[in-house]
Amino acid sequence: MLCLVEQLGVVPYAAALELQRERVAQRKAGEVPDTLLLLEHPHVYTLGRNARKENLLYSRAWLAALGAEVFETDRGGDVTYHGPGQLVGYPILDLTQYRRDLAWYMRSLEEVFIRVAADFGIEAGRLQRCPGVWVGDAKLVAMGVHVSRWVTSHGFAFNVSTDLSYFSHIVPCGIRDKQVTSLEKLLGRRVEAASVTDSVVKHFGQVFDLEMEPAGSKVER
């Protein structure tokens, strides 16, 4: 099966939400194939359906003064941060073509990044009852998804060269006794963003048995 890859650059969170809604509607109607949106957000904090407000440690006004927006979303999970140096991915997949099994889908997403980490010589894995991809007790990739009529949206946030200090303003994913890390922190060196994106696209295609094809589209904003 085919999956289009849209590499969109830096996209404000509100524009990305609207784009996801459009692609989900198109996928449900059979107007587009499965699609993987890859992008980066300006500083933003997002609260999932299960978010506890106290996990946002500062007021929205204080965060706005810091230059960060705050959005409530329909994805699963608690509160997280998106910003420069983080590869964000929103897969728009029709799970009726795979398995109607959300747990399988989450484990498959995790497998993508366990393999990506291995490409860079890092042994990553899972933690029981803690979605995402971890290196020891530090989260490398956060995940939160939404499914409507078995079409997925939202997805993953991979810390590549992220300024991790922004996570100190929240309780990341509502987990107080764990840390957050990045690929560059683990490696102790700079990493070319293109090499990370190439690895993600490769392993996404392998795990989901998809032919990954560049779409070359851009977001109007």
Image (cartoon, helix red, strand yellow):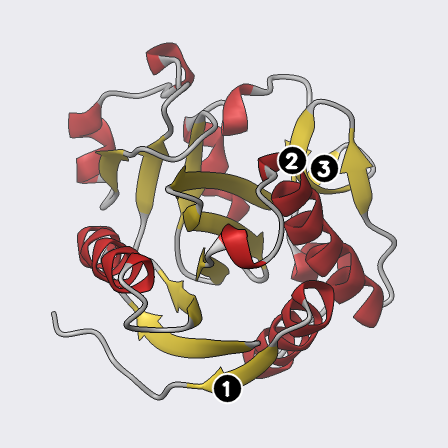
Q: What residue type is labelled 3?
A: Ala
Where residue 203 sits, quadrant-wise, is: bottom right
- Relative to the observer, which residue lies in front, 176 or 77? 77
Q: Residue at x 82, y 44 (%)?
A: 125
Percent across and percent down for residue 109 are 64, 52
Percent across and percent down for residue 23 are 28, 63
Tell me if residue 188 can be seen.
no
Report the residue marked by disc 1: 213
Q: Residue at x 66, y 64 (%)?
A: 208
Q: Locate the N terminus by quadrant.
A: bottom right
From the viewer's perspective, tell me whether residue 165 is left or right of residue 210. Answer: left
Neighbours of disc 1 within 10 Å: few (<14), some (14-19), many (20+): some
Which badge, 1 or 2, comes first in the chain's sequence?
A: 2
Report the residue marked by disc 2: 103
Q: What element carries label 1?
A: strand
Q: What element carries label 3?
A: strand
Where residue 122 sits, quadrant-wise, is: bottom right
Q: What residue type is labelled 1?
A: Glu
Q: Which is more foreground, mark 1 or mark 3? A: 1
- Relative to the observer, which residue lies in front, 147 or 169? 147
Q: Residue 147 carries which label?
A: none
Neighbours of disc 3 within 10 Å: few (<14), some (14-19), many (20+): some
- Relative to the observer, which residue lies in front, 130 or 177? 130
**Residues marked 2 and 3 touching at CB (< 8 Å):** no
**Residues marked 1 and 3 touching at CB (< 8 Å):** no
Report the residue marked by disc 3: 138
* Separation of marks 1 and 2 at Cα, in angstroms: 26 Å
